[in-house]
Image (cartoon, rainbow, N blue to C red):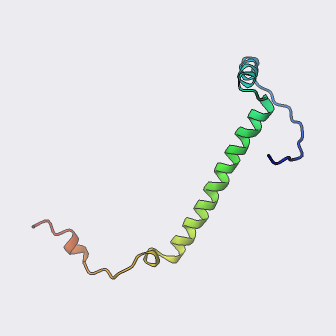
Amino acid sequence: MIHMSTRNITLALPADLIRRAKVYAAAHDTSISAMVAEMLSSRVAMETDYDEAWAAEVEVMKQGFGSGFSGEITWTRDELYDRRG
């Protein structure tokens, strides 16, 4: 596990939620602080992953769709929509 420096914060949460969170944390041998840290870390990581994936997609779009495909287009739009046969 990587040890990071920590800072305290104050959260205002409903009393019932705090009570249930304490019970849950005790049952899972953890702390509310560890649970909150894990949830926040997960959320931030998901957004970071999304931002990186979106940036990669933007690069693909800038290059154009043709750069990722091989072969030449040999059909016409009219041929694709010919419903006679």
Q: Quadrant of the C terminus?
A: bottom left
Q: Position of residue 47 (x, y in %)?
A: 65, 51
Left or right of 71, for residue 34: right
Give the image quarter of residue 65: bottom left
The residue under the point 45% across, 75% down is 68
Residue lying at the far left of the rendered structure = 85
Residue placed most toward the observer, 18 or 81: 18
Q: Position of residue 4 (x, y in %)?
A: 86, 47
Residue placed most toward the observer, 4 or 65: 4
Q: Position of residue 51 (x, y in %)?
A: 63, 58
The residue under the point 21% across, 74% down is 78
Residue placed most toward the observer, 30 or 60: 30
Numbered-mark total: 0
Give the image quarter of residue 26: top right
Left or right of 61, for residue 24: right
Q: Position of residue 81 (x, y in %)?
A: 20, 68
Give the image quarter of residue 38: top right
Left or right of 5, for residue 51: left
Q: Is residue 26 above or below residue 54?
A: above
The residue under the point 70% across, 38% down is 39
Residue placed most toward the observer, 13 or 46: 46
The residue under the point 31% across, 80% down is 73
Q: Is residue 16 above or below residue 39?
A: above
Left or right of 43, for residue 73: left
